[in-house]
Amino acid sequence: MNSQYPDSVINKILQITLDTQIFAYFAIEHNGTLVQQGGDMHIFGLPEWQLSDNILDDALFLSGNIPMDRSYETLPSLHISDDTVVDVHLFDDAPLIWVVLVDKTSELEWQTRARQSSNELRLLQQQLNQQQDSCQFEFFEALNMMALRLNDDGTFDLLKPVAENFSLIYPEAFASPHSLYPQHKFPFIENFLIDAEELWEKNIDHQRINSGPWVESLPGKGEIALEAIAINWESQKLLFIQILDASYQQNQEFLQLGREGVLTKQLLEQEVRKRTADIRAREEEIALRLICAADSRDDGETGSHIRRLGLYSELMARHLDWRADKIDEIRIAAPMHDIGKIGIPDNILKKPGKLTAEEYEVMKTHPQIGARILSNSQSELVNMAREISLGHHERWDGSGYPKGLAGKEIPISARIVAIVDVFDALIHKRVYKKEMSIDDALTIMQQGRGTHFDPNLFDLFIELKAEMSAIAANFDDPFCKDPLD
């Protein structure tokens, strides 16, 4: 488990959860392969997908949108099942596409209830408008609101009656016969009144602004959420203070749980990544030490050579935008390319001169020997090492061995190692040859572009000449050294 959520995707999830109660997410490759999923997937009535499944045939709402032609897309109010309506948010975070499903079913039901409540309040208001002015705002009691009217001297008059709940929140309003200063009771309102004054000065009838929620602590009663509303109403400058109902608190608690859940997930994933990195480091050291032991029979190979092969290959994989786990795998697997030489007799493997035709045929069996050593594994890393061992002497034009594969029949990992293996062998000294300069080596290798080497990978290799040269010049392997040297 080494997938790493990108920060941009986590920030988007946090932003979306501020407006919803239920969400789920998943990530797919551009071909539709599922590589990550989470949230409340089971609630949305979708099939039970497994990681590595191709889901495009099941996720019909993605049809026509994959591959994406922009970095972000939203598909509002889609019916993904008979009972479920969602907003679909798509984020292209190459090489993955992240899909966030936001449940809108409950919101649509809430809107229906809200419209019904609005109609009832409108009827109530029509009835109250026919009563005396002192009762005109009585209907706000049903909404848990306190109504205040601004005076010319900056004080406020309380418009009665007032919802009984405010006797706990603002008892001064009930006890004093004088005009009020709500900004002294609620410091939050003092800041809000700056914007409210600008609104009131415009004197545009029915225009309003909201303060947004704030929380007050009540002695012995816990916390309560409030919101202020400033409005111009028939030449009156009105300030309403509203008690937000239990649904607001429930929503805040849900959002807090959601934020804590995401943060917990981030912490867990950081720990998983750390442990995965530790495991990878142990795997790599064990593999390199065993390879060094095997290659100690071959006077033409060095520990630094096999380690450099991993670093060259890692560099190319990173510039090919491979996933992090695959980049790690090729760094560890590439050094195993010649492990099959353990099965070649010493009189051939250590021969200082040119091999005879018969000896060369024996030497050419080392890819199959390596493949047999690495076969039947459940590890993706070992399986990649097997394909590299079997394929690194194949050639782009089909003239290589052992199977005569051509072009993209050769696994890309083996095509990468074929390039960097030749490069490192040319520029370093061996018992049977002198080293040559990097420029001379590249001149020779250029002749194999499109015949020996994958032309596109070779062009990338040339683009990375500076980084490749730095690895070649500066890396010295710690694992295969004799501690007595």
Image (cartoon, grey):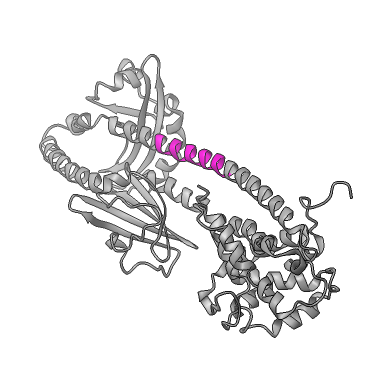
Residue 263: percent from the left, percent from the top?
49, 39
Residue 111: percent from the left, percent from the top?
21, 46
Instruction: Name the dominant secondary structure of the magenta segment.
Output: helix
Residue 303: percent from the left, percent from the top?
76, 57
Residue 265: percent from the left, percent from the top?
47, 40
Work out whether residue 257 or residue 346 is closer to the camera in this orientation and state it.
346
> Is residue 283 toward the left or the right of residue 169 in the image?
right
| Magenta span | 257-273
Work out whether residue 359 or residue 380 is closer to the camera in this orientation and state it.
359
State the residue at coordinates (78%, 51%): 478
Quadrant in the rendering for residue 161: top left
- How many numbered circles are shown? 0
State the residue at coordinates (57%, 63%): 371
State the residue at coordinates (56%, 39%): 271
State the residue at coordinates (28%, 60%): 58
> Is residue 437 toward the left or the right of residue 233 in the image?
right
In the rendered image, residue 271 lying in the magenta stretch gets the answer yes
Quadrant in the rendering for residue 436: bottom right
Quadrant in the rendering for residue 456: bottom right
Work out whether residue 47 or residue 24 is closer to the camera in this orientation and state it.
47
Is residue 170 visible in this depiction of the protein?
no
Seen in the picture, residue 28 relative to 170 is either above or below; the reply is: below
Is residue 344 visible in this depiction of the protein?
yes
Seen in the picture, residue 10 relative to 349 is either above or below; the reply is: above
In the rendered image, residue 291 lying in the magenta stretch gets the answer no
